[in-house]
Image (spheres, rainbow, N blue to C red):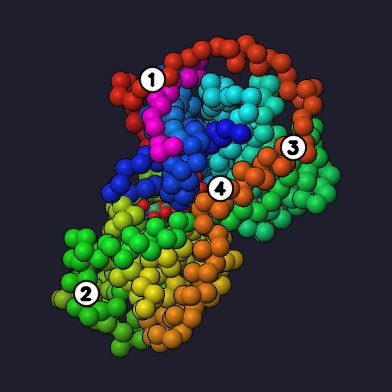
Amino acid sequence: MSLVVVSNRVARARANEPLTGGLAAALLPVIEKSGAIWVGSSGRVRDGSHKEPFAEVEALGAGALALLDLPAAHYGGYYEGFANSALWPALHSRSDLIRVSHHDYQSYREVNAFMARALMRFRKPDTAFWIQDYHFLSLGAELRDLGVRNPIGFFLHTPWPARAIMGAVPHHRELIEAMLAYDLIGFQTDDDCENFLSYVQSELGLKIQDSVVTSRYGKSRCAVFPIGIDVEKFALQAAKASSHPDVSRLRRSLNGEQLAIGVDRLDYSKGLVNRINAFDRMLVLNPALKRTVSLLQIATPSRGTIEAYSNLKSELARLVTEVNGRHGETDWMPIRYLNRGYSQTVLAGLYRTARVGVVTPLHDGMNLVAKEYVAAQNPADPGVLVLSKFAGAANELQTALLVNPHEIDGMARAIAAAFAMPLTERRTRWEAMMRKLRAGTAQQWFTDFSEALEDARASNEKTASNCPAAAAAVTSKSWPLHLVGSRSGAGVH
Ligand SMILES: O=P(O)(O)OC[C@H]1O[C@H](O[C@H]2O[C@H](CO)[C@@H](O)[C@H](O)[C@H]2O)[C@H](O)[C@@H](O)[C@@H]1O
Ligand SMILES: O=c1ccn([C@@H]2O[C@H](COP(=O)(O)OP(=O)(O)O)[C@@H](O)[C@H]2O)c(=O)[nH]1
């Protein structure tokens, strides 16, 4: 079986550059090893590209990366609009933040259809397609409409919310019906999978047996595949990174203080305001901690053209200034706040320098930073993870200090307890988490999903009537593949 993986965001194999988001971070190493083709957005748009998909293909380890220029007329409505201003807030239980127009939905469907046409170039008889995330809920149905009968799987990296919340997304029924063109639908946690099945049963009235939904497309199996990290790589990087200038300068600047670290995209789902409030509260409740601890918060810019994100950026800047102004001294600031990204090599060293990792999202599909923080610790003197019970990672990392991110006092107490935790308890908790991480690596996730997709398809040969024959013309149409380098187009993200 040859595998074609599709996601909006992709990553290139360039060491020493920050990665954007956990999807790209997790897929990069597994695709390099697997020999799969990874198709995604080039980050540029092109006029008229909806007529003729344009891709550059470059080698990626044993596999390849195909970068598509998405249609200029639809990119904004698709990415900033429907994907990130309707689906993202709903998937993170923030339907109050949904801002979307009918045009955005049309653009979303257009980009899904565009991607389906582009994928025909990569289809062989033995190809399986694996589609990633909420940007492409209807891509499987578009492929089926083009006559594709190959296995098609889908994995959702975000949470799936309670039934009523999805009902706030315009066109939710037709979109979620379209998802049932996938042979296998993967989720991060049992809760996500159960919420999805509950929606399908009650809103669509479809039959479900043993997590298999029967629809007009045939059968779709729903299952849980928690995503992981390359644990050994992170551990090794962290051990080596102590001599990196960014890491050694940080260590020298600490003057004996203990450090807590947070690393997040600047996103309302990450609970950054509550986290800063909890750190503030901790200093109010425990004045003796002043000058002895500080928080390094890396908040990498994300989706900055969307109002909810630019508002959050201003709110956080104001809040950090207030907290530093209230508690800071001439030679000590409680919060070091940075709006930039670091390579994973540097991050590994920063994680290891910090006695406490604070990962307190309000909702998060998984949160790979939580797993990376644990993997990067010194086995002889590990730090403590303070983790939101609403991150997917909490299902595995149960010996972290689990907190409710809405309860500021509780978080303040947990962070203080983490700073004070004795070595024996830190080691016991850390060793239990490392066992979980080693049992569920990114490689294992990739293998488990690929095998389950083959099984699901084998037991679910789609009938020809579900796949209109219109495909033939599209399949045989040739369109240009270009070597890296020669192209134009505006940058978008
Ligand atoms: O591509 P962007 O719009 O810049 O956003 C970055 C990514 O954010 C989300 O990541 C999710 O995937 C992680 C790995 O499974 C998971 O740990 C995390 O909880 C999720 O939030 C999004 O789902 C990706 O599509 C984006 O690329
Ligand atoms: O400056 C940064 C900040 C983050 N990351 C990476 O981005 C990913 C964030 O993934 P996570 O699942 O925690 O959250 P997401 O951003 O996908 O919601 C992790 O692999 C980080 O190592 C990075 O390379 N540099």
Residues at circles 4 and 3 in contact by the CB criterion of under 8 Å: no
Q: 10 Å neighbourhood of mark 1: few (<14), some, or many (≥20)?
A: some
- Identify the mark nearer the N-term, 4 or 3: 4
Give x and y (percent) for residue 226: 58, 56
Instruction: Look at the numbered disc 1 and give the secondary structure of its residue.
Output: strand
Report the residue marked by disc 4. Answer: 446
Can you identify the residue that label 3 sits on? 458
Q: Earlier in the sequence, mark 2 or mark 3?
A: 2
Q: Residue 482 got which mark?
A: 1
Query: What residue type is disc 4 on?
Result: Phe
How many circles with numbers are drawn on the protein?
Answer: 4
Report the span colored magenta: 50-62
Residue projecting furthest to the left: 330
Labels 1, 2: front one: 1
**x and y percentages locating residue 97 in the rendered image:** 53, 49
Report the residue at 33% width, 63% height from top: 238
Name the residue at 71% across, 42% down: 455
Instruction: Name the mark nearer the viewer: 1 or 4.
Output: 4
Q: Of callouts 1 and 2, which one flags the residue occurring earlier in the amino acid sequence?
A: 2
Disc ID at residue 254: 2
Does the magenta-highlighted stretch encompass residue 158? Answer: no
The verdict on residue 57 being magenta is yes
Q: Residues within 10 Å of mark 3 (few under 14, many from 20)?
A: few
Q: CA distance from mark 1 to mark 4?
A: 28 Å
